[in-house]
Image (cartoon, rainbow, N blue to C red):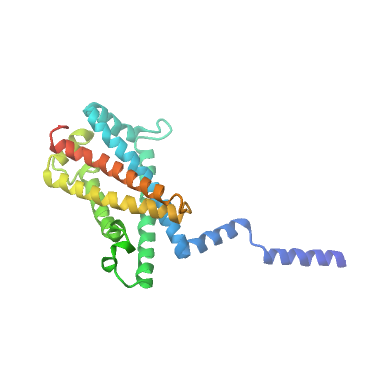
Amino acid sequence: MCIGFTGLASLSIMRTTFHPVPELRMSRVTTLTQSLVGKKVVMAVSGVVLLGFVLGHMVGNLKIFQGPEHFNAYAEGLRTVGAPFFGRGQLLWLVRLVLIAAAGLHIWAAYVVTRASWAARPVGYHSLRLVETTYAARTLRWGAVIILLFVVYHLLDLTFGPANPAFSPGDAYHNVVASFGRAPVAVAYLVAMGALSLHLYHGIYSACQTLGLNHPRYNAARRGFALVFSLVVAGGFAAVPLAVLTGGVR
């Protein structure tokens, strides 16, 4: 009887002392996301997801130089990819939902981290010396606002059509040419690509540091990669409106 009672007592202590694995993992995740470091990790990881989309989208846009047939086939392929397991547009919408979630988390984390930064250092970025922060870092938040507004307009212009008076459903090539044939739209696009380049440059460099890819020996290479990636992506996007404006794509 004494052994049985001791065993039951030990079992009771174990039950009150140790948490189930799922609850423990959830507790760790909650603790991480509630900390400032955790929010920076959320911002970095969601940024990596968005980086993958931006790179893939840029490469897809360059198919416009192959002509209307190839570009329209590419645009239609985005809607039929995954068939027959997925219906038309279903997988595309799944990807969109992931991107919306990543963008939402990225904006939320950036907002919280920015507020914490302002509270810890009330001196504005505009008043800091150049040696203390890069131009990309000082303009990061305004650049993010420009990019967000651009994305909204870009969707209304080339995805859904209300902002494009010559929008033709199913004819992506025509829609792009009609949109960038308007000089103000093309110039606004180029300005947004400039903001995107600065955002990518600072974001990639910071994300590497947040995720632990930081060592004095490799910092120069990390900065170089961020610079090359941001210029290639922004340049690839900018090539399309420039080609339409100059008559290379018509």
> Does 215 sit above or below residue 75?
below
Nearer to me, 57 or 87: 57
Residue 101 visible here: no
Residue 243 location (% of width, % of height): 17, 36
Residue 86 visible here: yes
Which residue sits furthest right? 1
> Does 111 sit above or below residue 57?
below
Q: Which quarter of the rendering shows the N terminus? A: bottom right
Q: Residue at x 23, y 50 (%)?
A: 192
Q: In this image, 100 relative to 67: left or right?
A: right
When asked about the image quadrant of residue 6, the answer is bottom right
Residue 60 location (% of width, % of height): 30, 35
> Does 247 sit above or below residue 216?
above
Nearer to me, 194 or 74: 194
Residue 210 location (% of width, % of height): 44, 56
Residue 179 location (% of width, % of height): 16, 41
Q: Residue at x 40, y 56 (%)?
A: 43
Q: In this image, 208 relative to 126: left or right?
A: right
When asked about the image quadrant of residue 159, the answer is top left
Q: How many marks?
A: 0
Q: Which quarter of the rendering shows the C terminus? A: top left
When asked about the image quadrant of residue 59, the answer is top left
Q: Residue at x 16, y 36 (%)?
A: 244
